[in-house]
Image (cartoon, rainbow, N blue to C red):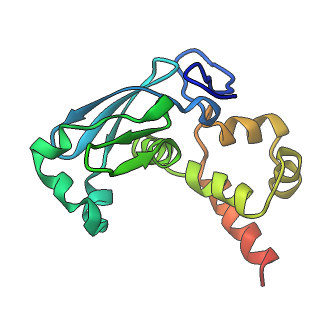
Amino acid sequence: MGGAEQESIDHKVEGVLTMKQAKISTVKALPDCSVEVTWENKSVSVVCLLDVIQRHQAMAHLLDEDVFKTVAVGEWGWSIEWGNGIDIGVDRLFELAQEQNDNPYWATYHQWKVNNELTHDAAHDALGISVRMSKYYDNAERIVPKTVALACVGWEASHHT
C-alpha cells in the first residue's frame, strides 16, 4: 500500500472503533489539552493529553493554549501533529482513547499478546477465552474485563519466572 490513497486494513463494525482501522480523519483542539478525534469510521473520541504533555519536557510548550490549538492531522491520518515538529502516533492516541473511554484494560491485553508473540489461538489456550473474543478484545470491539487483564498478568508472571 502507498500513496495518498492509502487505506487502512479494517473490519468495520458500525459505530465501533477497532485497532485495525485506527486512522484519523479530523482532530480539533479542546480546552485543558484535550483533543476531539474523528476516526476514519466516523466514531469520535475525546482524549486528554495533559498527562502526556506534562511527562515529556519536549512537549511543555504545548501547555500554551495558542500553540496547542495548532494541532492537525498528520500525513495519511497516522498521527496528530503540531507545527513545531511534535506528533503523537495513531497507536498511542488510540491506546489513550481506550484507557480514557471505558476500556482501560485494552492496553494490558494487547501488550500481553504482543510481548509474548501470541496468536488468537494461543490466547484462547492461555486464558480459556474463545478465539472470537480474543479478536474482539484485540481490536477493541469489546471491552476487556478486569478479570481478563488480571489473567494476562498472572499468565505472564507464571511463564517468566
In the rendered view, would you say 88 is above or below 1?
below
Q: Quadrant of residue 37?
A: top left
Residue placed most toward the observer, 81 or 157: 81
| Quarter of the figure that contains the N terminus | top right
Left or right: residue 115 versus residue 34 is right
Image coordinates of residue 81 in percent, x first then y, are: 34, 42
- Residue 28's spot in the image, x, y percent? 26, 29
* Residue at screen point 46% across, 17% down: 42
Residue found 87% across the figure and 53% down from its top? 122
Rendering quarter of residue 63: bottom left
Q: Residue at x 71, y 57 (%)?
A: 114
Q: Quadrant of residue 45?
A: top left
Of the 4 image quadrants, the one containing the C terminus is bottom right
Which one is nearer the viewer's eye here, 102 or 117?
117
Q: At which x and y percent is residue 131?
A: 84, 39
Q: Residue furthest bottom?
A: 161
Image vertical order of residue 115 relative to residue 90, above or below: below
At horizontal 71% and vertical 63% (from top left) the residue drawn is 115
